[in-house]
Image (spheres, grey):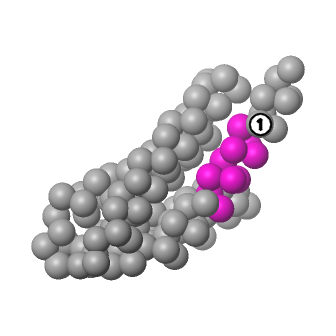
């Protein structure tokens, strides 16, 4: 069974989006690897897949505070990933990453909205 077909995740938009994004990150990193851009590829792979892993982990949070904390970690990973992708865009021998930056911006907006909504529910 595929992750995105699982009933547990099918209706959870942020899980679906972060998983799909992680798959794109893996593919992008593999292309960098093939072009011997190992160090950057590894950083992008680590931070880019960590976003979805932290969102997934947040689904089993022990409290709303823990839930928010895990999503904030995902946002920190997104910030780091953005840094590496900007570097790729500046170095002419690297594949352009604009499409990933655009998707990352959408994910960050959704994560920020979930965090702010959860905080409002707790106040």
Q: Is residue 111 magenta?
A: yes
- The residue that label 1 is drawn on is 116
Q: Which residues are magenta?
A: 106-115
Q: Residue at x 39, y 78 (%)?
A: 96
Residue 85 vs 109, above or below: the answer is below
Relative height, residue 23 to residue 82 (above, below): below
Along the line of sight, the residue nearer the viewer: 22 or 7: 22
Q: Position of residue 89 (x, y in %)?
A: 38, 71
Q: Is residue 123 left or right of residue 82?
A: right
Measured as percent of width and height from the top left, residue 88 is found at: 33, 68
Bin the neighbour count of mark 1 within 10 Å (Cα to Cα): few under 14, some 14-19, many 20 and up. Answer: few
> Residue 50 location in percent, x, y?
42, 49
Q: Position of residue 79 (x, y in %)?
A: 48, 47
- Asked which secondary structure carries label 1, the reply is helix
Q: Residue at x 49, y 50 (%)?
A: 78
Q: Is residue 61 magenta?
A: no
Q: In the rendered image, which quarter contains the C terminus?
A: top right
Q: Classify residue 68 by image quadrant.
A: top right
- Left or right, 107 with reference to 26: right
Q: Main secondary structure of the magenta part?
A: helix
Q: Is residue 9 left or right of residue 114?
A: left
**Residue in view at x 86 percent, y 29 percent:** 121
Residue at (41%, 62%) from the top-left corner? 86
Q: Nearer the viewer, residue 60 or 55?
A: 55
């Amino acid at each position: 069974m595929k992750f995105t077909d699982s009933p547990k995740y099918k209706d959870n938009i942020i899980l679906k989006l972060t998983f799909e994004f992680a798959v794109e990150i893996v593919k992008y990193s593999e292309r960098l690897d093939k072009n011997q851009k190992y160090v950057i590829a590894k950083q992008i792979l680590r931070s880019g897949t960590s976003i979805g892993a932290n969102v997934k982990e947040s689904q089993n949070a022990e409290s709303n505070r823990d839930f928010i904390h895990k999503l904030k970690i995902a946002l920190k990973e997104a910030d780091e990933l953005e840094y590496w992708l900007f570097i790729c865009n500046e170095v002419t021998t690297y594949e352009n990453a604009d499409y990933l930056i655009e998707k990352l911006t959408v994910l960050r907006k959704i994560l920020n909205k979930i965090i702010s909504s959860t905080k409002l529910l707790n106040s």
